[in-house]
Amino acid sequence: MIKNIVKGTILFLAIFFIFSGVLFAAETQEMNLSQAINLALENNLNLKIANLDLENAQIDYQKTKANNLLTESRYIELQGDLGLLQAEDNYTQTRNEVIIDVVQKYLQLNQAKKNVTAKSKEAELEKNLLEEVKAQVKAGHKGNLDLLRQENKYNNAVFDLEKANDDYHQSFREFKLELGLNNQEGEEFNLVEVDYPIVWQIDEEEALKKAIENSFVLELRKRQIELAKVDLERAEVAASPELDLRKLRNNIELANLNFNKTQKELANSIKKQFYTYKQSINSLDLSRQNLNQAQENNSIIIDQVKAGLKTKNDLLSAEISLLQAEYNLNSAILNYYTTKLTMHKLLGQKIEEGEIE
């Protein structure tokens, strides 16, 4: 008897620890947006290539600088500067693109998860309505055509749910690969929802000023003007033919015109993006107001259901509306960050983690 109790206790403990181990191993970890960005920056191949290109450009710059100590050629110095500037800009732009892409896909996944939840509620509601129609048909209050219509609605809702779920998991697998993570089954994690952002304040005049100060293309155009002037000076010292000199003077004028054209194009891009950014802020405010209204309506429906004034299906409808409002807010947050980070990119700034808050 005692032996059987002992054996039973041991068996129970063994099963308990086995299941505890399984549960512990299967515990889903969380990942926030900052962690996702860091993983992408660490593992992105394009960024690794850009980083090595930058290192090589820095080496070439130092070699050019050392070799130019004796000649002190302004022309060689300018060419060396351009190579380094190009590599630095390429690295910054590649890094910015990696961050923007991760932010977009991270927020899109959060949206997709909300969509799955909403589709699940919709399928549940259509199933409840189907049961009601079946009961009404049985009681003779509705016909088989009504039943067929509701069955189609329910089947469509189930199909939409399955598609939303499949789309979410496929996007999740692609996202994991982009972060450089092992894509084996079972290695899942929850994405922490991004809070409502602290709106970045900047006016159009300040944006234009920063863009002009930081623009690599404008700096490139300046160097091209200087190179064209140096070319003319060298040709004049060498007593070059007049036709050659005229061409070199034209090159200086062309370089100046290209500078002015680039400056106007940059200003136009900033103005357009600033307008888009302002619109994204308005959309953000409106979506939050709509969510607050949906939350209040859902709370009222809950009280009415408790009081017997509304049905469970009314509550499901309210919950679906609430989920849709949450989805719309996530969409507005995604649009806000996309336009904001694109603005930083146009301003020639290196995007930092602190920009995503």
Image (cartoon, rainbow, N blue to C red):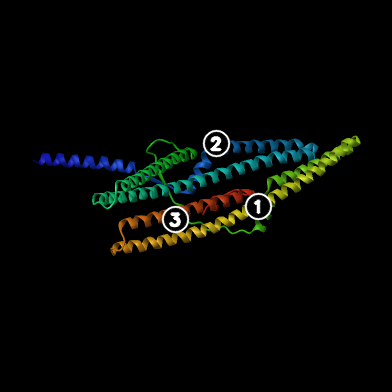
> Is there any visible trace of residue 238 in the rendered image?
no
Judging depth in this view, the residue of 126 and 35 nearest the camera is: 126
Q: In which quarter of the image is the N terminus?
A: top left
Q: On the picture, is 73 further left or further right than 173? A: right
SS assignment at label 2: helix
Percent of width and height locating residue 83: 70, 38
- Residue matched to label 1: 270
Q: Which residue is drawn at 59% across and 41% down?
A: 94
**Camera-nearest label, 1 or 3:** 3
N-terminal of the pair, mark 2 or mark 3, is: 2
**Camera-nearest label, 2 or 1:** 1
Residue 66 occupies quadrant: top right
- Residue matched to label 3: 325
- Residue matched to label 2: 45
Residue 201 occupies quadrant: bottom right
Judging depth in this view, the residue of 18 and 347 nearest the camera is: 347
Q: On the picture, is 345 further left or further right than 313? A: right
Characterize the local packing of mark 2: few (<14), some (14-19) or many (20 or more) Cα atoms within 10 angstroms.
few
Q: On the picture, is 288 further left or further right than 205? A: left
Judging depth in this view, the residue of 146 and 266 nearest the camera is: 146
Q: Residue at x 30, y 58 (%)?
A: 311
* Amino acid found under the numbered disc labelled 1: Ile
